[in-house]
Image (cartoon, grey):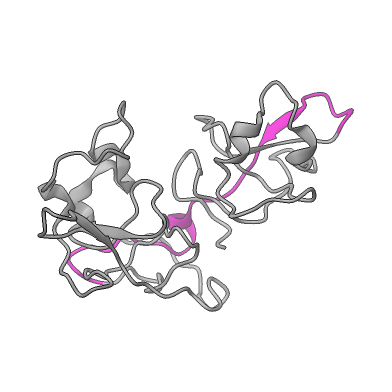
Amino acid sequence: PPECQLTTEGLEYAGFKNTDEDGRKCQPWLGRANDKRFSALDIMTISDEGIDSSHNYCRNPDADAYGLWCFTEEGTGERWGHCMVPFCYQLYERIAVEGKPAEGYPECLQTAMGKEYAGTTRITKTGKPCLRWDSQPYGKPEDFHPNATYEAHFRFGNSTLHQDFCRNPTSRQQPWCFVEDSGIEWEFCQIPFCPNYPSELTPIHEVL
C-alpha cells in the first residue's frame, strides 16, 4: 500500500506508519478494544482486510475530522496522538483530466477496494461503457452517505473531474461505474493490482 493518504480523514489509508506526529510508538488496536474512544464496531471500519494482535498502524476508525491517529505508549501523557502521513498528491498523484492518465500514477489498484484509484479505465468488466459521474443517471445511490452531498463523495468535491472513469466513491468491493442499463444501473470494473507500487515510481509534484 502507498505511504500517503488521499483525503483529510485518511479513511482509505492502509500503509504502515506506526508512530504519531510526536514520534511516540503506536499500540496495537486490538489491545485497546475496551478504550472509551474505541469499540468493537470501530474495528470494522479499519481499511485493512483483517487485523491481528500486532496491528499498530495509524488508522482513523472513528472518522476523526483531523485524520489518522493511534493509541500511544502507556505513561506518555496523552493516550493517543495524530499521525503525520503526507497526501498522495504531494508525492506522485495527479488527478486524471481530459482523458489523460495521471502523471506518475499507474493504471492499477493499490488496494482491493481501489478507493485510491485515479486512472482512466472507463469500461466495466463485461465490456459496458461507463456513464459520466456528473450525469447522475439514477440519482444518489443508496450507499452514498445520507448527510453528504453527491459531489462530496468524490475527491476534490467535483464529480465532473472524474468524467466517466471507474471509481469507488463509497466503500464497494472495487471500482465501479454507472452503465446504461436501468436493470442493473452499475457494474464493477476489472482493474489489475499494481505489482510493486509505489517503489517503481519516482515521486513527482502535483501538476493540474
As displayed, is residue 121 above or below residue 182? below
For the point 29% across and 37% down, the residue is 152
Q: Residue at x 50, y 43 (%)?
A: 11
Residue 71 visible in the picture: yes
Q: Residue furthest front?
A: 183
Q: Residue at x 22, y 56 (%)?
A: 186
Residue 94 located within the stretch drawn in magenta: yes
Rendered position, 66 above or below 207: above
Observer-nearest residue: 54 or 159?
A: 54
Q: Position of residue 83 (x, y in %)?
A: 64, 41
Q: Position of residue 39 (x, y in %)?
A: 66, 29
Visible residue check, residue 208: no
Q: Please determine whether, in this image, residue 49 is positioned above or below residue 100.
A: above
Image spot of residue 126 (x, y percent): 24, 73
Q: Determine if the magenta segment contains residue 78.
A: yes
Image location (x, y in percent) of residue 8: 46, 40
Q: Is residue 180 above or below residue 81?
A: below
Query: Relative to 56, is 167 on the left or the right?
Result: left
What is the count of numbered marks? 0
Out of 4 and 48, give the one closest to the viewer: 48
Q: Main secondary structure of the magenta part?
A: loop
Q: Which residue is at the front of the view, 163 or 114?
A: 114
Q: Is residue 135 left or right of residue 51?
A: left
Q: From this viewpoint, which residue is outermost toward the top?
A: 36
Bounds of the magenta span?
74-100
Q: Quadrant of residue 191?
A: bottom left
Q: Which corner quadrant of the image does residue 1 belong to? A: bottom right
On the image, which quarter does residue 70 sit in?
A: top right
Q: Is residue 148 left or right of residue 140?
A: right
Write the residue at 47% across / 73% down: 193
Query: Dividing the image into 4 quarters, which one contains the C terminus?
Result: bottom left
